[in-house]
Every structure is written in C-alpha cells, then in structure tokens.
Image (spheres, rainbow, N blue to C red):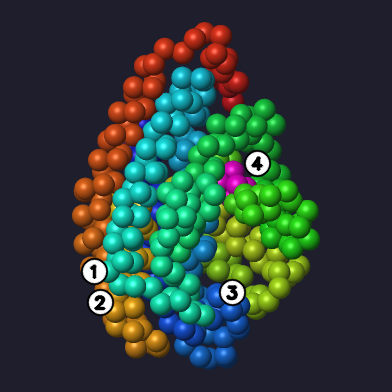
Amino acid sequence: MSEAQVARYRSLDGLRGVASFVVLGYHALLIVPAVSALYVAHANPALLSPEWWLYATPLRLLFAGHEAVLVFFVLSGFVLTLPFLSRPPTGRSTLAYYGRRIVRLYLPVWASLVVALALALAVPRQPGPTWLGSHHAPTVGTLWHDAILVLGTSNLNSPLWSLTWEVWFSLLMPLMYLVIRFARADRWWWAAIPVLIAVSALSRFAVVRQLLPAAWLTDDLLQYLPVFAIGMIVAFNRDGVSSAAASVRHWWPVVAAALLLTVAPSIAAPNGSYGVRQSVVYAASLIGVTVILCLAFASPARRPLETRPVQWAGTRSFSIYLVHEPILVAVALLVGASGWWWVPIAALTIPVILVVAELFYRLVERPSIALSRTVGRALSARPVPAAAEPRPAVTPDAG
C-alpha cells in the first residue's frame, strides 16, 4: 500500500473521531429541556431562541448526532468491504470474519454495560417527560436486550441503539457483498446509490412501515442497511472516486455543500409528521453523508483529519461512543440539571469522559481488538470440509 493510500485511510479514523465528538456534544445538549423537546416531543424551536440557533442553523453541524451516526454507518460499510475486495469471501474467510467482528463489537459493548449499570445504581434514574427522564432504572429484561443487541436496546446506554444495526449489518455483510457483485451494482454505482438513498427515505413513511412484517425490526433495517450499502459501493469504486477527486480544483465549496446537505433535515423541514418534504431533505442528508465519506479519503479535505489530536479521537472513538452517555446522565442527575446552566457543567465533564474513554480503550477495547484478531486467525486456520466450502463468487482479479 502506497503512502497516499495509508494517509487516506488514516483520515477515515479521523472522521470517526470527529463524529464521536459530535455525538458527545449532541447528548450533552439533550439534557437541556428546551433541546430535549425538539427530539422527544418533536416541537419546533422558537425563532432566534438558543435552541433555534443550535437546531435550525448551520451551527447544528456541531451537534448533529443522528447524522454523525449515519457517517459511522457508511464508514462501516466502506471499511468492512475492503478486505473482501482483495480476497473474495469463502467459507473459511467468512467464518474468520464473523469471529473477528463478533468479538470486536460485543466485548466492548458488554463492558460498557457494566459501566452504565454501575452508574445507574449509584445515581438512581428519575423518569420524566424529557430525554433525561427517558432513562429508567435497569431491569434484567433490559440488560438482556442490551447485551444481545439484535432485538433492540434500552436507554441504559442509549447510543447502543446504533450497535443493533451495526450487528445486523455485520451479520448480513457477506451476503450483501455477494449481491452487489452479482447485480453489478458496483459498476452501476451512479444508479445504485440513488436507489439506496430512495429506499432509505421511503422506508420512513408510516404507510410503508405498516406494510412491513415484524415492523419493529424491519422498518429500521430498511432505513439503515442501505446506508451501510452506500459505503460498500463507494469502497468498490474508491479508485474511481480518487481519480475524479484529482480533477477538482476548489474543494472547500464542496466540503461546505456536503456539510449543509447533511444537516438539511433540521434546517429545511420543521418537526412534524414525515411527509414528502421531510423525505426529500432526508435524501439530501444521505447525499451529504456520502460526499463526506468520499472527501475524507479522496480529497485535500482529509488533511485536518490526519492531525494528531483528531487521530487520537479516531482511535478512541468507539470507547468515547460507549462510555460518554452514562457519565453525562449520572452527572446531570447529580447536579439536578434543568436548564441552560447545565452547558458549562457539561463542558467540565467532557475531560472526565475523555480520561475514562482512554482507560476503557486500554483496558477493554485494545485487548478486545487483539483477541478478535487471534480468533480470526484461529478460525482461518480451522479445516473446513471441502463440500461445505463454497466456491468464490468472483475471481480475485475480477473488475
């Protein structure tokens, strides 16, 4: 791999770090009742109020939590596809992939649940109408759901909701890879990506969700799996994206446009029932997320993502994501947070979160990464009966 290739993949770590800080800021602000009402009660902010500036203007880029999760999803689709491009899936390699991925995801999640449970027991939850009040006392049932992920999660550690879809995608990813290759969606990317965006946008209509079997699961699968698939298709075409990027002279207008498209839903469509207008701006948001991914590995815009502080955040992004919310909730309950005066306290809490994330990374995440690689190597070496091992769907040199 060339030096340029190493740099562009390091920049994806940086993008992951930026997204983790955006989610952190988003959850810190949700503790303010006026901001909570925008998401829990789907209220619209009063013009020129503090929450209006943070929700309905480009300032939302600093606290765009849901959009940051979409960035995580396209990143996962992109990064998990790369090994399959150099070595098409076989029975043995797919088994090794599952072993690595399950260990990589579940061990840190289980450890984060221990942290969240300890904080919930030390600082009892206080149910109420706000986002902070949506955190109820843990039960055996909710802990079980949180631990297995695939059946949904509670608010013991609310960011785990996205891990439900990470796990589902991880389980379905080898099949999705084969479908993309069989359908030649990688070659028809200019049509496949708009179709995936349309499917994700249409899945949010109530009439569509009512028609789906097991809607509690399939409606969000239909919304989020296409987002992962967009990242996969970009991975298939990463060399073409890089070549196209070389012809662009002025990057910062492209960066600005992508960022504004990403937060278009809150700026251009007020809260309310999901309709045509909301679907259009949500589709625009997915376009912005896709362009951000491309910018992060194929343009000069990647350079700030390769700086040392951002790289640190990138390598610790999963740990930050897993531990920040229980700490914020516990501190908010301890101080009785009820208004904007919570913001400076949240700012003082962030360094504590980063220290805990560093400890979590060293004690939990980094060992889990090492163990996942060990498991992957062991499963790669495990004999697989010839009759049970499928032939590769494509040859390694297929275009």
**Residue 389's disc number:** none
Residue 178 to residue 339: above or below: above
Distance Cα–Cα, label 4 vs label 3: 28 Å
| Residue at point 78%, 53% (across, down) | 211
**Residue 351's disc number:** 1
**Amino acid of disc 4:** Trp
Q: In this view, does 170 lie to the left or right of 99?
A: right
Distance Cα–Cα, label 2 vs label 4: 45 Å
Distance Cα–Cα, label 3 vs label 2: 28 Å
Looking at the rendered structure, the secondary structure element under dot 2 is helix
| Residue at point 60%, 21% (across, down) | 393
**Relative depth, front residue between 174 and 146:** 146
Residue mark closest to the camera, 1 vs 3: 1
Q: Is residue 130 visible?
A: yes
Residue bearing mark 3: 266
Q: Can residue 194 be seen in this view?
A: no
| Residue at point 46%, 13% (across, down) | 384
> Callout 4: few (<14), some (14-19), or many (20+) C-alpha neighbours within 10 Å?
some
**Amino acid of disc 2:** Leu
Dot 2 or dot 4, earlier in sequence? 4
Task: Classify residue 173 by image quadrant.
Answer: top right
Residue bearing mark 2: 348
Task: Classify residue 375 by image quadrant.
Answer: top left
- Magenta-tinted stretch: 225-229
